[in-house]
Amino acid sequence: MKGKNRIDWKSFLKVVFVIALPIACQNFLTTTASMVDTIMIGSQGELSVAAVGICSQISSLFFSSYFGFAGGALLFFSQYWGAGNKEGINRTFGLAMVCMLGVSLLFGGLAVANPGFLLRIYTDKENIVQVGIPYIRIVGFAYPLQVLAIIISFLMRSTERVKAPLFSSMAALVTNFVFNWILIYGRFGFPKMGAAGAAVGTLVSGIVNLAILTIVLVKDKKTVALKLRLMFDWKDGFSGTYLKKCFPIICNELFYGIGQMLINIVIGRQTESAIAAMAAFRVLEGFVFAFFGGLADASTVVVGKEVGAGKHMKGYQYVKGFAILCPMITFVIVLICLILNQPLLGLFGLGAEALSYGKYMLMIYLAAGTVRTCNYIMNCCYRAGGEAVFGTVLELGCLFLVSVPATWIAGMILHLPFLAVFAFVYTDELIRLVFELWYTRSGKWIKPVTEEGKATLEDFRKELAAQRQSA
Protein backbone atom coordinates (compact mmCIF):
# COMPACT_ATOMS: atom_id res chain seq x y z
CA MET A 1 0.00 0.00 0.00
CA LYS A 2 3.10 2.22 -0.23
CA GLY A 3 2.45 3.72 3.22
CA LYS A 4 0.16 6.43 1.88
CA ASN A 5 -3.35 7.17 3.00
CA ARG A 6 -4.98 6.26 -0.29
CA ILE A 7 -6.29 3.11 -1.90
CA ASP A 8 -4.04 1.08 -4.16
CA TRP A 9 -6.85 0.05 -6.51
CA LYS A 10 -4.75 -2.43 -8.46
CA SER A 11 -3.89 -4.39 -5.32
CA PHE A 12 -7.43 -4.03 -3.96
CA LEU A 13 -9.20 -5.24 -7.12
CA LYS A 14 -6.84 -8.20 -7.33
CA VAL A 15 -7.99 -9.27 -3.87
CA VAL A 16 -11.63 -8.72 -4.89
CA PHE A 17 -11.37 -10.99 -7.92
CA VAL A 18 -9.27 -13.71 -6.29
CA ILE A 19 -11.00 -13.95 -2.89
CA ALA A 20 -14.05 -11.69 -2.65
CA LEU A 21 -15.80 -12.50 -5.92
CA PRO A 22 -15.95 -16.30 -5.38
CA ILE A 23 -17.26 -15.75 -1.83
CA ALA A 24 -19.86 -13.28 -3.12
CA CYS A 25 -20.97 -15.78 -5.78
CA GLN A 26 -21.20 -18.57 -3.20
CA ASN A 27 -23.26 -16.36 -0.91
CA PHE A 28 -25.47 -15.41 -3.85
CA LEU A 29 -26.10 -19.06 -4.69
CA THR A 30 -26.85 -19.93 -1.05
CA THR A 31 -29.40 -17.14 -0.79
CA THR A 32 -30.82 -17.97 -4.20
CA ALA A 33 -31.48 -21.53 -3.04
CA SER A 34 -33.53 -20.19 -0.11
CA MET A 35 -35.40 -17.77 -2.40
CA VAL A 36 -36.29 -20.41 -5.00
CA ASP A 37 -39.23 -21.48 -2.81
CA THR A 38 -40.92 -18.08 -3.02
CA ILE A 39 -40.33 -17.81 -6.77
CA MET A 40 -41.54 -21.30 -7.67
CA ILE A 41 -44.57 -21.08 -5.41
CA GLY A 42 -45.73 -18.03 -7.39
CA SER A 43 -47.90 -20.16 -9.65
CA GLN A 44 -49.98 -21.12 -6.61
CA GLY A 45 -51.18 -17.52 -6.19
CA GLU A 46 -50.66 -14.52 -3.90
CA LEU A 47 -51.78 -16.40 -0.78
CA SER A 48 -49.03 -19.01 -1.07
CA VAL A 49 -46.44 -16.33 -1.87
CA ALA A 50 -47.50 -14.36 1.20
CA ALA A 51 -47.36 -17.50 3.40
CA VAL A 52 -43.86 -18.48 2.27
CA GLY A 53 -42.80 -14.85 2.69
CA ILE A 54 -43.98 -14.86 6.32
CA CYS A 55 -42.13 -18.14 6.92
CA SER A 56 -38.99 -16.56 5.47
CA GLN A 57 -39.27 -13.81 8.09
CA ILE A 58 -39.21 -16.47 10.82
CA SER A 59 -36.08 -17.95 9.22
CA SER A 60 -34.57 -14.46 9.17
CA LEU A 61 -35.10 -14.14 12.93
CA PHE A 62 -33.44 -17.54 13.36
CA PHE A 63 -30.52 -16.33 11.24
CA SER A 64 -30.16 -13.21 13.39
CA SER A 65 -30.19 -15.32 16.56
CA TYR A 66 -27.25 -17.54 15.60
CA PHE A 67 -25.25 -15.29 13.29
CA GLY A 68 -23.59 -13.44 16.16
CA PHE A 69 -21.69 -16.62 17.01
CA ALA A 70 -20.80 -17.11 13.33
CA GLY A 71 -19.68 -13.50 12.95
CA GLY A 72 -17.47 -13.81 16.02
CA ALA A 73 -16.01 -17.04 14.64
CA LEU A 74 -15.22 -15.30 11.35
CA LEU A 75 -13.32 -12.62 13.26
CA PHE A 76 -11.17 -15.22 15.07
CA PHE A 77 -10.79 -17.46 12.01
CA SER A 78 -9.45 -14.66 9.82
CA GLN A 79 -7.10 -13.17 12.40
CA TYR A 80 -5.78 -16.58 13.50
CA TRP A 81 -5.27 -17.49 9.83
CA GLY A 82 -3.26 -14.32 9.31
CA ALA A 83 -1.12 -15.22 12.33
CA GLY A 84 -0.82 -18.91 11.36
CA ASN A 85 -2.48 -20.10 14.60
CA LYS A 86 -4.20 -23.38 13.65
CA GLU A 87 -4.89 -24.37 17.26
CA GLY A 88 -6.89 -21.17 17.73
CA ILE A 89 -8.89 -21.96 14.58
CA ASN A 90 -9.76 -25.41 15.97
CA ARG A 91 -10.92 -24.00 19.29
CA THR A 92 -13.02 -21.34 17.60
CA PHE A 93 -14.69 -23.87 15.31
CA GLY A 94 -15.69 -26.17 18.15
CA LEU A 95 -17.07 -23.46 20.43
CA ALA A 96 -18.96 -21.66 17.66
CA MET A 97 -20.47 -24.93 16.43
CA VAL A 98 -21.81 -25.84 19.88
CA CYS A 99 -23.35 -22.38 20.41
CA MET A 100 -24.96 -22.28 16.96
CA LEU A 101 -26.36 -25.80 17.26
CA GLY A 102 -28.01 -24.84 20.54
CA VAL A 103 -29.85 -21.95 18.85
CA SER A 104 -30.88 -24.12 15.88
CA LEU A 105 -32.37 -26.82 18.12
CA LEU A 106 -34.40 -24.20 19.99
CA PHE A 107 -35.84 -22.63 16.84
CA GLY A 108 -36.19 -25.91 14.99
CA GLY A 109 -38.00 -27.53 17.91
CA LEU A 110 -40.47 -24.65 18.14
CA ALA A 111 -41.06 -24.62 14.37
CA VAL A 112 -41.81 -28.35 14.37
CA ALA A 113 -43.85 -28.49 17.58
CA ASN A 114 -45.89 -25.27 17.30
CA PRO A 115 -45.58 -23.59 13.88
CA GLY A 116 -48.93 -21.80 14.20
CA PHE A 117 -47.70 -19.88 17.23
CA LEU A 118 -44.72 -18.51 15.27
CA LEU A 119 -46.80 -17.57 12.23
CA ARG A 120 -49.48 -15.73 14.22
CA ILE A 121 -46.81 -13.45 15.66
CA TYR A 122 -46.18 -12.10 12.17
CA THR A 123 -49.68 -11.90 10.71
CA ASP A 124 -53.34 -11.82 11.72
CA LYS A 125 -54.45 -13.41 8.42
CA GLU A 126 -55.57 -16.94 9.37
CA ASN A 127 -55.68 -18.12 5.74
CA ILE A 128 -51.97 -17.25 5.41
CA VAL A 129 -51.21 -19.07 8.68
CA GLN A 130 -52.86 -22.29 7.52
CA VAL A 131 -50.87 -22.35 4.27
CA GLY A 132 -47.63 -21.60 6.13
CA ILE A 133 -47.92 -24.23 8.90
CA PRO A 134 -46.77 -27.31 6.89
CA TYR A 135 -44.00 -25.29 5.25
CA ILE A 136 -42.35 -23.95 8.42
CA ARG A 137 -42.78 -27.30 10.22
CA ILE A 138 -40.70 -29.11 7.57
CA VAL A 139 -38.14 -26.29 7.29
CA GLY A 140 -37.61 -26.52 11.06
CA PHE A 141 -35.80 -29.84 10.50
CA ALA A 142 -33.34 -28.03 8.20
CA TYR A 143 -32.25 -25.45 10.79
CA PRO A 144 -29.48 -27.58 12.43
CA LEU A 145 -28.16 -28.49 8.97
CA GLN A 146 -28.02 -24.82 8.07
CA VAL A 147 -25.85 -23.76 11.00
CA LEU A 148 -23.41 -26.64 10.48
CA ALA A 149 -23.04 -25.69 6.81
CA ILE A 150 -22.54 -22.02 7.73
CA ILE A 151 -19.75 -22.63 10.25
CA ILE A 152 -17.91 -25.01 7.89
CA SER A 153 -18.31 -22.56 5.03
CA PHE A 154 -16.99 -19.68 7.18
CA LEU A 155 -13.97 -21.76 8.16
CA MET A 156 -13.18 -22.50 4.52
CA ARG A 157 -13.65 -18.88 3.46
CA SER A 158 -11.40 -17.62 6.23
CA THR A 159 -8.64 -20.02 5.21
CA GLU A 160 -9.01 -18.99 1.56
CA ARG A 161 -10.66 -22.20 0.35
CA VAL A 162 -13.48 -20.62 -1.59
CA LYS A 163 -14.12 -23.26 -4.29
CA ALA A 164 -15.75 -25.94 -2.11
CA PRO A 165 -18.45 -23.65 -0.62
CA LEU A 166 -19.15 -22.33 -4.12
CA PHE A 167 -19.56 -25.86 -5.53
CA SER A 168 -21.72 -27.05 -2.62
CA SER A 169 -24.00 -24.01 -3.01
CA MET A 170 -24.42 -24.75 -6.72
CA ALA A 171 -25.31 -28.36 -5.95
CA ALA A 172 -27.80 -27.25 -3.26
CA LEU A 173 -29.43 -24.77 -5.64
CA VAL A 174 -29.92 -27.41 -8.35
CA THR A 175 -31.25 -29.91 -5.79
CA ASN A 176 -33.71 -27.38 -4.38
CA PHE A 177 -34.96 -26.46 -7.85
CA VAL A 178 -35.45 -30.09 -8.94
CA PHE A 179 -37.26 -31.19 -5.77
CA ASN A 180 -39.41 -28.06 -5.81
CA TRP A 181 -40.40 -28.70 -9.43
CA ILE A 182 -41.33 -32.29 -8.65
CA LEU A 183 -43.13 -31.77 -5.33
CA ILE A 184 -44.79 -28.36 -5.71
CA TYR A 185 -46.46 -29.35 -9.00
CA GLY A 186 -46.74 -33.13 -8.45
CA ARG A 187 -44.50 -34.42 -11.26
CA PHE A 188 -43.62 -38.10 -11.95
CA GLY A 189 -46.60 -39.39 -9.97
CA PHE A 190 -45.70 -37.57 -6.75
CA PRO A 191 -48.53 -35.77 -4.92
CA LYS A 192 -48.99 -32.04 -5.58
CA MET A 193 -47.76 -30.63 -2.24
CA GLY A 194 -47.65 -26.88 -2.92
CA ALA A 195 -45.84 -24.93 -0.20
CA ALA A 196 -45.02 -28.13 1.73
CA GLY A 197 -43.24 -29.46 -1.36
CA ALA A 198 -41.05 -26.35 -1.44
CA ALA A 199 -40.13 -27.00 2.20
CA VAL A 200 -39.06 -30.57 1.39
CA GLY A 201 -36.86 -29.19 -1.39
CA THR A 202 -35.23 -26.84 1.11
CA LEU A 203 -34.59 -29.70 3.55
CA VAL A 204 -33.06 -32.02 0.93
CA SER A 205 -30.87 -29.25 -0.51
CA GLY A 206 -29.60 -28.53 3.02
CA ILE A 207 -28.57 -32.18 3.39
CA VAL A 208 -26.71 -32.09 0.06
CA ASN A 209 -24.93 -28.83 0.92
CA LEU A 210 -23.75 -30.07 4.32
CA ALA A 211 -22.66 -33.47 2.96
CA ILE A 212 -20.40 -31.91 0.30
CA LEU A 213 -18.84 -29.43 2.72
CA THR A 214 -18.19 -32.14 5.33
CA ILE A 215 -16.54 -34.47 2.83
CA VAL A 216 -14.21 -31.73 1.56
CA LEU A 217 -13.40 -30.58 5.10
CA VAL A 218 -12.50 -34.09 6.27
CA LYS A 219 -10.36 -34.87 3.22
CA ASP A 220 -8.37 -31.61 3.25
CA LYS A 221 -5.83 -32.01 6.04
CA LYS A 222 -3.15 -29.74 4.57
CA THR A 223 -4.71 -26.32 5.21
CA VAL A 224 -6.24 -26.68 8.68
CA ALA A 225 -6.87 -30.17 10.08
CA LEU A 226 -9.69 -30.22 12.63
CA LYS A 227 -8.91 -32.29 15.74
CA LEU A 228 -11.53 -33.14 18.35
CA ARG A 229 -9.16 -32.68 21.30
CA LEU A 230 -8.43 -29.11 20.12
CA MET A 231 -11.99 -28.24 19.06
CA PHE A 232 -13.28 -28.74 22.58
CA ASP A 233 -10.19 -27.56 24.45
CA TRP A 234 -11.33 -24.15 25.73
CA LYS A 235 -8.78 -23.76 28.51
CA ASP A 236 -6.87 -20.60 29.45
CA GLY A 237 -10.04 -18.54 29.32
CA PHE A 238 -10.52 -18.98 25.56
CA SER A 239 -14.29 -19.39 25.82
CA GLY A 240 -14.49 -16.16 27.80
CA THR A 241 -12.37 -14.31 25.22
CA TYR A 242 -14.49 -15.64 22.36
CA LEU A 243 -17.81 -14.84 24.02
CA LYS A 244 -16.58 -11.39 25.05
CA LYS A 245 -15.78 -10.55 21.42
CA CYS A 246 -18.98 -12.25 20.22
CA PHE A 247 -21.31 -10.60 22.74
CA PRO A 248 -21.64 -7.25 20.91
CA ILE A 249 -22.11 -9.09 17.60
CA ILE A 250 -24.70 -11.41 19.18
CA CYS A 251 -26.56 -8.41 20.59
CA ASN A 252 -26.31 -6.64 17.25
CA GLU A 253 -27.71 -9.56 15.24
CA LEU A 254 -30.31 -10.67 17.80
CA PHE A 255 -31.78 -7.25 18.53
CA TYR A 256 -31.58 -6.31 14.87
CA GLY A 257 -33.64 -9.43 14.17
CA ILE A 258 -36.14 -8.41 16.85
CA GLY A 259 -36.36 -4.92 15.36
CA GLN A 260 -37.01 -6.39 11.93
CA MET A 261 -39.62 -8.69 13.49
CA LEU A 262 -41.47 -5.65 14.87
CA ILE A 263 -41.35 -4.05 11.43
CA ASN A 264 -42.59 -7.28 9.83
CA ILE A 265 -45.48 -7.39 12.31
CA VAL A 266 -46.55 -3.99 10.96
CA ILE A 267 -46.22 -5.22 7.37
CA GLY A 268 -48.17 -8.39 8.26
CA ARG A 269 -51.15 -6.21 9.23
CA GLN A 270 -51.37 -4.62 5.76
CA THR A 271 -53.53 -5.92 2.90
CA GLU A 272 -52.87 -9.35 1.38
CA SER A 273 -51.63 -7.66 -1.83
CA ALA A 274 -49.16 -5.61 0.21
CA ILE A 275 -47.94 -8.69 2.10
CA ALA A 276 -47.49 -10.60 -1.18
CA ALA A 277 -45.66 -7.62 -2.74
CA MET A 278 -43.39 -7.46 0.32
CA ALA A 279 -42.64 -11.19 -0.01
CA ALA A 280 -41.67 -10.70 -3.67
CA PHE A 281 -39.60 -7.61 -2.82
CA ARG A 282 -37.77 -9.52 -0.08
CA VAL A 283 -36.70 -12.06 -2.68
CA LEU A 284 -35.25 -9.36 -4.94
CA GLU A 285 -33.71 -7.62 -1.93
CA GLY A 286 -32.31 -11.00 -0.91
CA PHE A 287 -30.53 -11.33 -4.24
CA VAL A 288 -28.98 -7.89 -3.76
CA PHE A 289 -28.07 -8.65 -0.16
CA ALA A 290 -26.65 -12.03 -1.17
CA PHE A 291 -24.08 -10.46 -3.43
CA PHE A 292 -23.00 -7.56 -1.27
CA GLY A 293 -23.33 -9.76 1.83
CA GLY A 294 -20.85 -12.10 0.18
CA LEU A 295 -18.53 -9.18 -0.44
CA ALA A 296 -18.98 -8.21 3.22
CA ASP A 297 -17.97 -11.71 4.30
CA ALA A 298 -14.99 -11.47 1.97
CA SER A 299 -14.03 -8.10 3.43
CA THR A 300 -14.08 -9.70 6.88
CA VAL A 301 -11.69 -12.40 5.70
CA VAL A 302 -9.35 -9.98 3.92
CA VAL A 303 -9.32 -7.25 6.56
CA GLY A 304 -9.13 -9.70 9.47
CA LYS A 305 -6.20 -11.52 7.91
CA GLU A 306 -4.20 -8.29 7.48
CA VAL A 307 -5.02 -7.02 10.99
CA GLY A 308 -4.19 -10.40 12.51
CA ALA A 309 -0.83 -10.39 10.71
CA GLY A 310 -0.07 -6.87 11.94
CA LYS A 311 -0.45 -5.20 8.51
CA HIS A 312 -2.94 -2.63 9.76
CA MET A 313 -2.53 0.03 7.08
CA LYS A 314 -3.24 -2.51 4.38
CA GLY A 315 -6.40 -3.61 6.20
CA TYR A 316 -7.39 0.04 6.65
CA GLN A 317 -7.11 0.68 2.92
CA TYR A 318 -9.12 -2.43 2.08
CA VAL A 319 -12.01 -1.18 4.22
CA LYS A 320 -12.09 2.11 2.33
CA GLY A 321 -12.08 0.21 -0.96
CA PHE A 322 -14.97 -2.05 0.01
CA ALA A 323 -16.96 0.92 1.34
CA ILE A 324 -16.75 2.53 -2.11
CA LEU A 325 -17.13 -0.56 -4.31
CA CYS A 326 -20.06 -2.32 -2.63
CA PRO A 327 -22.58 0.58 -2.70
CA MET A 328 -21.76 1.11 -6.39
CA ILE A 329 -22.52 -2.54 -7.12
CA THR A 330 -25.75 -2.39 -5.11
CA PHE A 331 -26.96 0.69 -6.99
CA VAL A 332 -26.37 -0.98 -10.35
CA ILE A 333 -28.10 -4.24 -9.34
CA VAL A 334 -31.18 -2.47 -7.93
CA LEU A 335 -31.35 -0.20 -10.99
CA ILE A 336 -31.42 -3.28 -13.23
CA CYS A 337 -34.18 -4.80 -11.07
CA LEU A 338 -36.16 -1.56 -11.35
CA ILE A 339 -35.82 -1.45 -15.14
CA LEU A 340 -36.89 -5.11 -15.36
CA ASN A 341 -39.53 -4.86 -12.62
CA GLN A 342 -42.43 -6.16 -14.74
CA PRO A 343 -40.90 -9.50 -15.79
CA LEU A 344 -39.18 -10.00 -12.41
CA LEU A 345 -42.25 -9.32 -10.28
CA GLY A 346 -44.35 -11.26 -12.75
CA LEU A 347 -42.55 -14.43 -11.63
CA PHE A 348 -44.48 -14.36 -8.35
CA GLY A 349 -48.02 -14.46 -9.74
CA LEU A 350 -48.88 -11.07 -8.22
CA GLY A 351 -52.03 -9.13 -9.02
CA ALA A 352 -52.08 -5.61 -10.50
CA GLU A 353 -52.06 -3.84 -7.11
CA ALA A 354 -49.17 -5.92 -5.78
CA LEU A 355 -47.18 -5.37 -9.00
CA SER A 356 -47.61 -1.62 -8.60
CA TYR A 357 -46.44 -1.80 -4.99
CA GLY A 358 -43.38 -3.80 -6.02
CA LYS A 359 -42.30 -1.24 -8.63
CA TYR A 360 -42.41 1.70 -6.22
CA MET A 361 -40.72 -0.31 -3.47
CA LEU A 362 -37.77 -0.86 -5.81
CA MET A 363 -37.65 2.88 -6.52
CA ILE A 364 -37.40 3.62 -2.80
CA TYR A 365 -34.80 0.90 -2.31
CA LEU A 366 -32.59 2.26 -5.09
CA ALA A 367 -31.50 5.04 -2.72
CA ALA A 368 -32.07 3.35 0.64
CA GLY A 369 -30.38 0.08 -0.32
CA THR A 370 -27.25 1.82 -1.58
CA VAL A 371 -26.80 3.65 1.72
CA ARG A 372 -27.62 0.51 3.68
CA THR A 373 -24.93 -1.44 1.83
CA CYS A 374 -22.29 1.12 2.75
CA ASN A 375 -23.28 0.94 6.42
CA TYR A 376 -23.34 -2.85 6.42
CA ILE A 377 -19.92 -3.30 4.86
CA MET A 378 -18.25 -0.87 7.25
CA ASN A 379 -19.80 -2.54 10.29
CA CYS A 380 -18.56 -5.95 9.08
CA CYS A 381 -15.06 -4.54 8.68
CA TYR A 382 -15.11 -3.12 12.22
CA ARG A 383 -15.77 -6.64 13.49
CA ALA A 384 -12.93 -8.04 11.40
CA GLY A 385 -10.63 -5.45 12.95
CA GLY A 386 -11.68 -6.55 16.44
CA GLU A 387 -14.18 -3.77 17.27
CA ALA A 388 -17.81 -4.86 17.58
CA VAL A 389 -19.23 -2.38 20.11
CA PHE A 390 -19.42 0.85 18.10
CA GLY A 391 -21.28 -0.64 15.13
CA THR A 392 -23.65 -2.52 17.44
CA VAL A 393 -24.61 0.51 19.53
CA LEU A 394 -25.03 2.69 16.46
CA GLU A 395 -27.10 0.19 14.47
CA LEU A 396 -29.39 -0.81 17.34
CA GLY A 397 -29.73 2.77 18.57
CA CYS A 398 -30.83 4.03 15.16
CA LEU A 399 -33.09 1.00 14.60
CA PHE A 400 -35.02 1.22 17.88
CA LEU A 401 -34.99 5.00 18.26
CA VAL A 402 -35.78 5.91 14.65
CA SER A 403 -36.78 3.17 12.21
CA VAL A 404 -38.97 0.88 14.36
CA PRO A 405 -40.97 3.70 16.06
CA ALA A 406 -41.44 5.54 12.75
CA THR A 407 -42.68 2.41 10.96
CA TRP A 408 -44.92 1.37 13.87
CA ILE A 409 -46.53 4.81 14.14
CA ALA A 410 -47.01 5.05 10.38
CA GLY A 411 -48.59 1.61 10.04
CA MET A 412 -50.31 0.82 13.35
CA ILE A 413 -51.39 4.25 14.59
CA LEU A 414 -51.70 6.62 11.62
CA HIS A 415 -52.60 3.82 9.17
CA LEU A 416 -50.76 5.51 6.33
CA PRO A 417 -50.72 4.00 2.82
CA PHE A 418 -48.51 0.94 2.50
CA LEU A 419 -45.76 2.60 0.45
CA ALA A 420 -45.40 5.34 3.07
CA VAL A 421 -45.09 2.68 5.77
CA PHE A 422 -42.47 0.88 3.68
CA ALA A 423 -40.41 4.05 3.23
CA PHE A 424 -40.16 4.53 6.99
CA VAL A 425 -38.38 1.16 7.31
CA TYR A 426 -35.12 2.77 6.08
CA THR A 427 -35.25 6.10 7.91
CA ASP A 428 -32.26 5.26 10.12
CA GLU A 429 -29.72 4.57 7.37
CA LEU A 430 -28.63 8.15 6.59
CA ILE A 431 -27.98 8.87 10.28
CA ARG A 432 -25.80 5.76 10.56
CA LEU A 433 -23.88 6.66 7.42
CA VAL A 434 -22.62 9.97 8.84
CA PHE A 435 -21.22 8.37 12.00
CA GLU A 436 -19.79 5.29 10.27
CA LEU A 437 -17.88 7.34 7.67
CA TRP A 438 -16.24 9.28 10.50
CA TYR A 439 -15.41 6.14 12.50
CA THR A 440 -13.99 4.31 9.49
CA ARG A 441 -11.64 7.17 8.75
CA SER A 442 -10.50 7.34 12.39
CA GLY A 443 -9.01 3.80 12.33
CA LYS A 444 -10.08 3.30 15.95
CA TRP A 445 -11.84 0.05 14.98
CA ILE A 446 -8.52 -1.77 14.57
CA LYS A 447 -8.22 -3.84 17.77
CA PRO A 448 -6.34 -7.08 17.01
CA VAL A 449 -6.74 -10.28 19.04
CA THR A 450 -3.40 -11.79 17.93
CA GLU A 451 0.01 -11.01 19.41
CA GLU A 452 1.32 -10.19 15.91
CA GLY A 453 -1.42 -7.61 15.45
CA LYS A 454 -0.96 -6.03 18.87
CA ALA A 455 2.80 -5.65 18.33
CA THR A 456 2.37 -3.24 15.38
CA LEU A 457 -0.74 -1.37 16.52
CA GLU A 458 1.03 1.65 17.99
CA ASP A 459 3.14 2.10 14.85
CA PHE A 460 -0.03 2.10 12.73
CA ARG A 461 -1.67 4.77 14.88
CA LYS A 462 1.39 6.98 14.64
CA GLU A 463 1.55 6.52 10.86
CA LEU A 464 -2.13 7.35 10.44
CA ALA A 465 -1.82 10.45 12.60
CA ALA A 466 1.23 11.61 10.64
CA GLN A 467 -0.60 11.14 7.33
CA ARG A 468 -3.53 13.26 8.52
CA GLN A 469 -1.24 16.06 9.64
CA SER A 470 0.51 16.12 6.28
CA ALA A 471 -2.74 15.91 4.28
Image: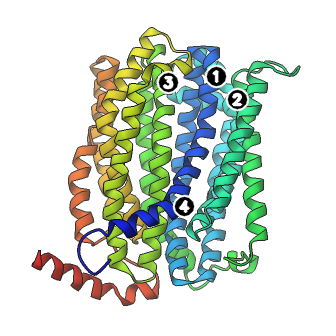
Q: Position of residue 186 (x, y in %)?
A: 80, 19
* CA distance separating discs 1 and 4: 32 Å
Q: Where in the figure is residue 281, as x and y percent of width and height?
A: 46, 28
Mark 2 and mark 1 in contact (Cβ < 8 Å)? yes
What is the crowding at mark 2: few (fewer than 14 residues within 10 Å), some, or many (at least 20)? Answer: many
Query: What's the coloring here?
Result: rainbow
User: Closer to the camera, 95 or 377?
Assistant: 377
- At 32% from the left edge and 52% from the top edge, which residue is drawn? 375
Residue beneath the point at 72% across and 75% down: 226
Q: Earlier in the sequence, mark 1 or mark 2?
A: 1
For label 2, the SS is helix
Q: Amino acid at mark 4?
A: Phe
Q: Report how far apart the C-alphas of labels 1 and 3 lie in the structure.
A: 14 Å
Q: Is residue 105 visible?
A: no
Q: Residues within 10 Å of mark 1 (few under 14, many from 20)?
A: many
Q: In the figure, is residue 436 to the left or right of 223? A: left
Numbered badge on residue 41: 1
Q: Nearer the viewer, mark 3 or mark 2?
A: 3
User: What number is the disc on residue 198?
Assistant: 2
Q: Secondary structure at mark 3?
A: helix
- Pointer 4: what residue? 69
Q: Which residue is mark 3?
A: 344
For image coordinates 63% across by 54% down, the residue present is 166
Q: Amino acid at mark 3?
A: Leu
Secondary structure at badge 1 equals helix
